[in-house]
Amino acid sequence: MTSRATIKINFKGGIISPGELYNILVAATRSGIYYVSFGLRQQLLIDLPIELIPGLTGELKKLDVFFELDEDCYPNIISSYAAEEVFINNTWLSEGVYKDILDEFDYKPRLKINISDSNQSFTPLLTGNINWIASPAAQHFWHLFIRFPKTNQVYEWTSMTYTNDIAKVSKEIEEVILENREQFYDNQQANGVSLFTKLSPDKFIQKQSDRPLTLPSFNLPYYEGLNRYNNKYWLGIYRRDEIFSIDFLKQLCLLCLDTRIGQLCSTPWKSIIVKGIEEKDRVLWNGLLEKHSINMRHAANELNFQVEDDCPDGLELKNYLVKGLNSDDTRTFGLCIGIKTRKKSEVFSSILVRRKP
């Protein structure tokens, strides 16, 4: 029996309330835990010895925080919200629209759902099973790509769906897939046309798509540092070992609250982004980074890796490869290097390094 376990806490769309996160971190500290991390699906991960499980789970239940222990039955909904205004401009998809969509999810999805702007590649577009991509031409309509669970079979629906119906359509698709597992789950011959004949499209607002959506080329922006946008600043924090000190994060949450920042964001790169920092508060944020010796300028070829969650072997290999890339002065612009050590795990990449069977 393993001596450690992982508690997973979802934050829909990677949008995190500083107050809620602070309370979770306080509970973790009371339970004798001092470090946490974030996952590929923008979820919070707490690795802990099994003897600390009763204490932390009890504290989380007091806070009415939903969590999973060594399971991922309810994958987090991920979104490109973190990139909005920072890396995405000239789009009809605003922060408010993301929140409206996420608020409509009144159930816990059992399939992976991605909600993304079409004008970005910061958030992987097709790593979900139900992938919604905003139409660049028709406001409040969304293209839908189904990637059948445990396969790489992708089907693009010919109709677009209205913003207010995304949660309802997602729920119906999930129910059909899970009720017909032999057809649509872990089946390389899964058929998209067959799936959509089982839906009830008349219940939703639909619009025929004129042509297949052209997906953007992968171009990962530099997502760390304290940077100016519009009349404010955003702060991106990446950790080489994927581990964040709870003491640091608690002080970050308090600084958000003190400076009236209502949210922070986790990203699919296991980093965090804080948006909306005022010029007058920049000295406070620099002070926080200096106090905790947070390095803000990693090499770009280190930031474009995707490693499975809770994977020490994959992280060790990543660090080895980064040293080699730096030694050879190799350009990695436009590439994402994925490391996969587990069968049937799903890692976004343009170059995949996979463990031999």
Image (cartoon, helix red, strand yellow):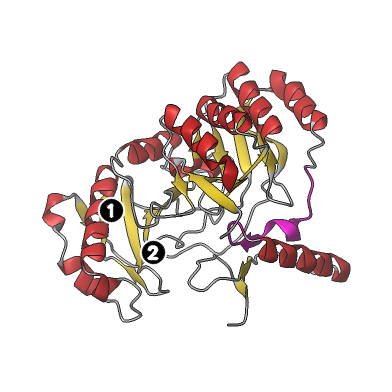
Give the image location of residue 6, x and y in percent: 55, 50
Distance, label 1 to label 2, CA atoms, is 19 Å
Residue topped by disc 2: 213
Question: Does residue 79 lie above or below 200 as drawn?
Answer: above
State the quadrant of the N terminus: bottom right
Using a 10 Å C-alpha cutoff, classify the residue at mark 2 as few (fewer than 14 neighbours), some (14 to 19) or many (20 or more): some
Residue at image coords 42%, 42%: 93
Residue topped by disc 1: 170
Residue at image coords 21%, 62%: 176
Residue 236 is marked as none
Give the image location of residue 125, x and y in percent: 47, 59
Residue at image coords 55%, 71%: 342
Foreground residue among 38 and 200:
38
Residue at image coords 36%, 53%: 137
Q: Is residue 231 visible?
A: no
User: In the rendered image, which quarter is residue 51 located in?
Assistant: top right
Residue kind at label 1, given as amino acid type: Ser
Q: Element under label 2? A: loop
Q: Is residue 276 magenta?
A: no
Residue kind at label 2, given as amino acid type: Leu
Q: Is residue 308 magenta?
A: yes
User: In the rendered image, which quarter is residue 355 located in?
Assistant: bottom right
From which residue to which does the magenta span run?
Answer: 296-310
Question: Does residue 75 lie above or below 313 as drawn?
Answer: above
